[in-house]
């Protein structure tokens, strides 16, 4: 009876992300980047006029204090956790709030009001 096991490295288990909790930033940022990359690949990105992002579960309950909002916005702008310049995030978040514009994949601007379009559904679970 031969037993098998998975071979993983420490790098498979841990990721560095923005915010105090990478579990609340790395996944959301990657998901949002993948979303806008799929829009681009399907040639539908130019047809997008508005984005609304709804957060559920622990992301909605604790994500605000853990940087999930920043991660979502940066992912929608096409950033990945591995390549983002952490020093640029604050300025970009301020720009998004002031201009009410999000640059999807850093190439297509859409109207985005963070208080309206980033929704924290704390009472709902998926």
Image (tube, rainbow, N blue to C red):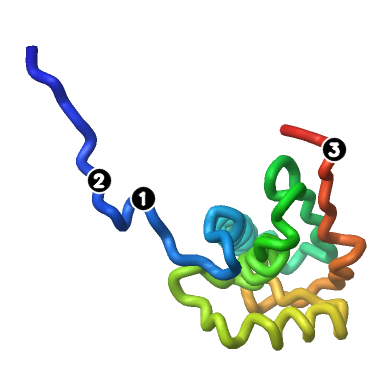
Residue extending farthest to the right is 116
Reading the image, the residue beneath label 2 is: 8
Asked if the residues shown at circle 2 and circle 1 are in contact, with their CB atoms under 8 angstroms apart, the answer is: yes
At 52% across and 77% down in the image, what residue appears? 84
Q: Residue 90 carries which label?
A: none
Using the numbered discs, state the Cα–Cα distance from disc 3 to disc 2 in whole angstroms.
36 Å
Using the numbered discs, state the Cα–Cα distance from disc 1 to disc 3 in whole angstroms.
30 Å
Asked if the residues shown at circle 3 and circle 2 are in contact, with their CB atoms under 8 angstroms apart, the answer is: no
**As drawn, 107 above or below 17:** below
Reading the image, the residue beneath label 1 is: 13
Residue extending farthest to the top is 1
Q: Position of residue 119 (x, y in %)?
A: 84, 54
**Front-most of residues 42 and 126:** 126
| In this rendering, position of residue 78 left or right of residue 15 | right
At 62% across and 66% down in the image, what residue appears? 75
Q: Which of marks 3 and 2 is nearer the N terminus?
A: 2
Q: What kind of element bears circle 2?
A: loop
Q: Which of marks 2 and 1 is nearer the N terminus?
A: 2
**Front-most of residues 94 and 99:** 94
Q: In which quarter of the image is residue 7?
A: top left
Q: What kind of element bears circle 1?
A: helix
| In this rendering, position of residue 126 left or right of residue 4 | right
Q: Residues within 10 Å of mark 1 (few under 14, many from 20)?
A: few
Q: Position of residue 3 (x, y in %)?
A: 13, 21
Q: Residues within 10 Å of mark 2 (few under 14, many from 20)?
A: few
Reading the image, the residue beneath label 3 is: 123
Q: In which quarter of the image is the C terminus?
A: top right
| In this rendering, position of residue 23 left or right of residue 125 | left
Q: How crowded is mark 3: few (under 14 residues within 10 Å), some or many (20 or more)?
A: few
């Amino acid at each position: 009876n031969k037993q098998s096991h998975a071979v993983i490295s420490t790098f498979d288990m841990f990721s560095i992300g923005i915010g105090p909790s990478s579990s609340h930033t790395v996944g959301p940022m990657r998901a949002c980047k993948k979303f806008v990359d799929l829009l681009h690949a399907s040639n539908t990105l130019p047809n997008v006029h508005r984005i609304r992002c709804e957060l559920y579960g622990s992301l909605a309950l604790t994500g605000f204090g853990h940087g999930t909002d920043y991660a979502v916005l940066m992912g929608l702008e096409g950033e990945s956790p591995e390549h983002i310049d952490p020093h640029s995030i604050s300025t970009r978040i301020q720009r998004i709030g002031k201009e009410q514009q999000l640059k999807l994949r850093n190439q297509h601007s859409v109207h985005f009001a963070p208080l309206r379009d980033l929704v924290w559904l704390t009472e709902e679970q998926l």
